[in-house]
Image: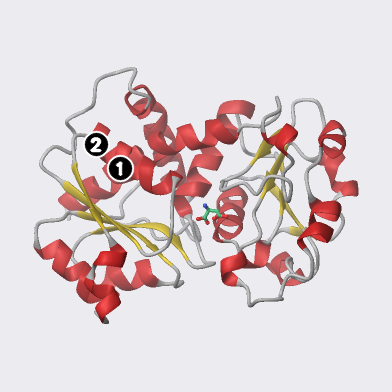
Amino acid sequence: MSGWSSPHLLGMRGLAREAIEAVLELAARRRPHAEAQAPPLGLLAGRTVANLFFEPSTRTRTSFTLAARRLGAEVIDYAVAAGSTVKGESTVDTARNIVAMGVDALVVRSAHAGTPVLLARHVDAAILNAGDGAHEHPTQALLDLFTLREIFGEVRGLQVLIVGDIGASRVARSNLWALRTMGAEVTLCGPPTLVPRAFEALGARVAHRLEPELERADAVMLLRIQHERHRAGAIPSVREYARLFGMTAERAARLRPGAIIMHPGPIHRGVELMPEVADGERSVVLRQARNGVAIRMAVLELCLEARRRG
Ligand code: ASP
């Protein structure tokens, strides 16, 4: 398990290439168990993982749960709406109380950037960031790397085009760090209101027109407009956005042979991705979802092992 030493997974920023390699390699080995082609493993038997989700989730929560179970851990779900956070308890206090009952790892999703870092400082458990505000979503970036590597063999040198609400997207940020560390070229595309030029300072190209970018991309990642992170009225027109930046069948036909379409979900069909492309032959969206289980098995195992070693 060389390459990985932290009991936490807080973000992709600053994560060394060797650490990323350790996750990808272990995920590849865990894959048969992730897909239930092989029996569950007992590697985390006796350990307890708690899901602490303060924002909605479909894929991330389900796959963390499956991942923990397929490693033999026990999983509990903290139901935010029914818990004491709504009575004014702080996130740190909630987390400390849950951990006091014998929980080893907290999988945390929060609307606030920095919550996982705060918990890692103040709570005695492995902390896995399942998305914090517009900041990071590291396991999404890891499963995207895994998917790219599976399809192209190598991430280095790939041209990855990320289209959408980049400024408000934790998926874009985590992927930018991860892809740059692994040697891919990243272009961020969308209207200037959603894709600030400031991203160039982080090592990405910024493009405000989609058409000229289509022919050079190996992978196009479409992202949803993060309505929950915008003030009402901040997005002028969804229809206009779809017309200028939506991935239509005509646009997909102009991609290179072999180029793929990615999306972390949830897809807004007819806005950033048209149904015929989402379900078309270039689309790998279900493969991304499937790969999420193996990746989350790997990070749970690596973090809990690092925690055990102290
Ligand atoms: N599911 C991803 C996230 O939680 C992407 C999205 O919601 O648009 O960030």
Q: Residue at x 64, y 55 (%)?
A: 224
| SS category of the residue bearing label 1 | helix
| Furthest-right residue in this view | 212
Q: Residue at x 53, y 36 (%)?
A: 288
Whole-Å distance between the Cαs marked 1 and 2? 6 Å
Q: In the image, what residue type sits under mark 1? A: Thr
Q: Name the residue under label 1.
A: 65
Decide which of 69, 124 is in the foreground and name it: 69
Is the residue under label 2 in contact with that under label 1 (CB below 8 Å)?
yes
Q: Is mark 1 within 8 Å of ligand 1?
A: no
Q: Which quadrant does the C terminus fall into?
A: bottom left
Colouring convention used in this rendered image of the protein: secondary structure
Rendered location of residue 278, percent (x, y):
68, 35
Rate crowding at label 1 as few (under 14), some (14 to 19) or many (20 or more) other CA atoms within 10 Å. Answer: many
Residue 175 placement, left or right of 31? right
Q: Name the residue under label 2.
A: 69
Rendering coords of residue 13 (x, y %): 50, 61
The residue lying toward the viewer, choosing from 66 and 21, is 66
Q: Is mark 2 on a helix, strand or loop?
A: helix
Image quarter for residue 192? Answer: bottom right
Q: Is mark 2 within 8 Å of ligand 1?
A: no
Q: Where is residue 44 in the image (x, y as percent from the top left)?
A: 18, 39
| Disc 2: CA contacts within 10 A as few (<14), some (14-19) or many (>=20) | many
Q: Is residue 167 left or right of residue 207?
A: left
In this view, 46 is above or below 172: above
**Residue 3 seen in the current view:** no
Q: In this view, does 135 lie above or below 35?
A: below
